[in-house]
Amino acid sequence: MHKLWRLLGRRLLQFLPILVFATFVVFGLLQLVPGDPALALAGDYASAQRIAEIRHEYGFDQPLIVQYGIWLWHAAHGNLGLSLFSSEPVTQLIWDRLPNTMFVAVYALIVASAIGIPLGVLAATRSGTKLDGFVTSTASMGVALPSFWLAMILALQFSLYRHWFPTTGSAYFFTDPVGAISHATLPAIALAVSVVATLARQVRSDLLEVLNQQYMRTLRAKGLSNGAILWKHGLRNVSATLLTLVGLQVNRLFSGAVVIEAVFAIPGVGSLVSYSAINKDFPVVQGVVLVLVLIVISVNLLVDIITALLDPRVAAA
C-alpha cells in the first residue's frame, strides 16, 4: 500500500506541469485568434474610449503572462470567471453540459471495448486465416475513417430516412434513460469506430506476441487447453497494456466529441467550446479546456492505480 501511495504522489507531481502547460498553450493560442473580444463586446459602433475601457475592465490590456497568472490563481480557487457574452458563471455553463458529453463518451468507450477487444482476440487466435485478414483490413479502414463523415452518414440513414433514432438533441440519463440512450446511440457509434479499430489492432498484436512465446509452447506441451492458455495466461499478460490503451482513448473521444456534437446538435461541452471559440468567449474556452484536461489526467491516474494493482512491479518501479 505504501508503494501505491508513493506511485500516486509521483504521478500527481508529473501531471501538474502537464496541466499548467496545456492550459497555458491554449491561453496563448486564443490570443492569436483574429479579432478583438473587447470590440465584440462593445459593438461595431463603439468609440475607441469605450473599447479601451472594456479592455481594461476585463484585463485584456495586461501582458499575456499576467493575464494567465490571474486566471490560474482564480481557477485554483474554483473560480473560472464569467462568460463574456452571457455573463453566466463558466462553471455553471460547463456543469450543465458536461453530463451530455460524458454520457456519449462513456457509451462510445463501452461499445468500442465490447467490440474491439473480442475482435482483436479473435484475430490473434486465428492468425494467418481469412478471418484474421478481414479483421486486420477492416480495422485499418476504421482508423482512417473520418468520424464526422460517418456521423453524417449515420444521421442521414438512421435518423432522417428510417427514423430509428432522434436526429438532434439529448436527454438526461437519470430522468429519461431510454431517451438518453436513444439520443446518444448514433453519436457513440460514430465516435467508437476508430477506437474499435485501434483496440482490435493493438490487442491482436500484443496477444499474438504473447501466444508465440516459448513458455506458451511449454503450456501446450503439458496438455493445457487453448482456452485455458488464452484466458489464464494470454489475456492476463496483456491486461495492463490493454487497460492503458483504453485509458488513452478517452482523450480521443473527448476531442472527437467537438465535431460529433455539432453534427447531432448535442448541447455538450464540445459544442460549447466550439461556439465560444468562434465568438471569442475566452473564459469559457479556457474553462472547458481545464475541465477536459483534468478528466483526462484523472482517467490516466486511475489507469495507473489499477495497473499497479494488477502488476505490483509497476508500483515498485
Image (cartoon, rainbow, N blue to C red):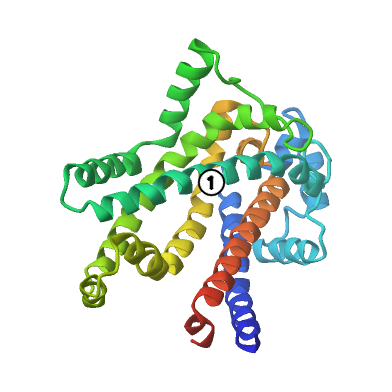
Q: What x and y, as percent, mark residue 99?
A: 71, 42
Q: Quadrant of the N terminus?
A: bottom right
The answer to whether residue 63 is above or below residue 149 is below
Please tell me in which quadrant of the rendered image residue 97 appears: top right
Q: Camera-side residue: 91 or 185?
A: 185
- Residue drawn at x 45%, y 69% is 240
- Residue 215 in the image: x percent, y percent? 25, 77
Q: Secondary structure at mark 1?
A: helix
Badge 1: few (under 14), some or many (20 or more) residues near its Cα, within 10 Å?
Answer: some
Q: Position of residue 153 (x, y in %)?
A: 43, 23
Question: What residue is drawn where x is 48% and y is 57%?
Answer: 246
Outermost residue to the top = 161
Query: Can residue 32 be seen?
Result: yes
Residue farthest toward the front in the current orientation of the protein: 223
Is residue 267 or residue 289 the one in the foreground?
267
Q: Name the side, left or right, on which 104 lies relative to 130.
A: right
Tell me if I can see residue 198 in this picture. Answer: no
Quarter-wise, where is residue 300 in the image? Answer: bottom right
Name the residue nearer the viewer: 171 or 290.
171
Along the horizontal axis of the image, is 112 left or right of 145? right
Q: Check disc 1 and give the amino acid type.
A: Ile
Q: Which residue is mark 1?
A: 110
Residue 39 lies, with reference to residue 282, above or below; the image says above
